[in-house]
C-alpha cells in the first residue's frame, strides 16, 4: 500500500487521495467522507444575514447544517456545505476555502 498523501491539511480539514476528513466533527472524533460519496459542494458566505452562523462553533442550529468544531470560525467569511445525499449537510470552514473547494471540485467530477 502506498502513502495516502494529503493535498490539503489545516489541522481541522484534510483532503487526501481518497476523501475528505473533517476533524472534531463528532464529540469522539473525525468524520471521513469518500469523494465518491460527495454529490456537490456549495459555498456559503458567512456575511450579511449569515454572519450569525460564524458563532456556531460546533453542532447544528437548524437541523440542516452540521458544523465541526472550529474555534477560528468567527474570524472566517466562507463555509463549504457538503452534499452527501442525506438530510444533514456537513458544513466546514477550512482556513483556505478556495483551495478546498477546488480540490473537491476536481475529485468529485
Image (cartoon, rainbow, N blue to C red):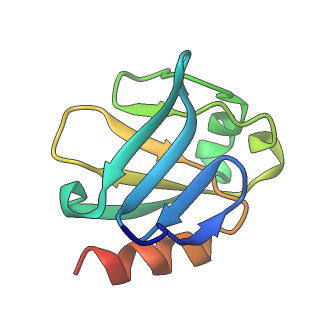
**Residue in the image at 43% along x and 37% along y:** 31
Residue 62: quarter of image: top left
The quadrant of the image that shows the C terminus is bottom left
Residue 105 point in image, percent of width and height: 36, 78
Report the front residue among 7 and 86. Answer: 7
Report the front residue among 24 and 105. Answer: 24
Residue 96: quarter of image: bottom right
Answer whether residue 45 is visible to the viewer in this image.
no
Residue 2 point in image, percent of width and height: 42, 72
Vertical order, 44 against 55 (above or below): below
Residue 35: quarter of image: bottom left
Vertical order, 106 against 79 (above or below): below
**Residue in the image at 53% along x and 72% along y:** 5
Residue 52 point in image, percent of width and height: 67, 34
Number of numbered discs overlaid on the protein picture: 0
- Left or right: 32 in relation to 8: left
- Left or right: 3 in relation to 1: right
Answer whether residue 9 is visible to the viewer in this image.
yes
The quadrant of the image that shows the N terminus is bottom left
Vertical order, 90 against 99 (above or below): above
Report the front residue among 22 and 95. Answer: 22
Residue 40 point in image, percent of width and height: 27, 64
Vertical order, 102 against 28 (above or below): below
**Residue in the image at 42% along x and 52% along y:** 81
User: Seen from this angle, which residue lies furthest top?
Assistant: 27
User: Seen from this angle, which residue lies furthest left?
Assistant: 85
- Left or right: 72 in relation to 80: right
Amino acid at each position: 500500500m502506498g502513502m495516502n498523501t494529503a493535498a490539503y491539511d489545516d489541522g481541522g480539514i484534510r483532503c487526501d487521495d481518497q476523501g475528505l476528513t473533517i476533524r472534531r466533527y463528532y464529540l469522539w472524533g473525525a468524520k471521513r467522507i469518500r469523494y465518491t460519496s460527495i454529490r456537490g459542494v456549495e459555498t456559503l458566505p458567512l456575511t450579511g444575514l449569515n454572519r450569525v452562523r460564524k458563532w456556531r462553533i460546533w453542532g447544528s442550529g437548524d437541523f440542516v447544517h452540521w458544523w465541526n468544531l472550529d474555534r477560528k470560525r468567527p474570524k472566517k467569511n466562507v463555509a463549504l456545505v457538503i452534499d452527501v445525499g442525506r438530510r444533514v449537510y456537513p458544513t466546514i470552514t477550512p482556513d483556505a476555502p478556495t483551495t478546498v473547494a477546488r480540490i473537491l471540485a476536481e475529485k468529485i467530477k
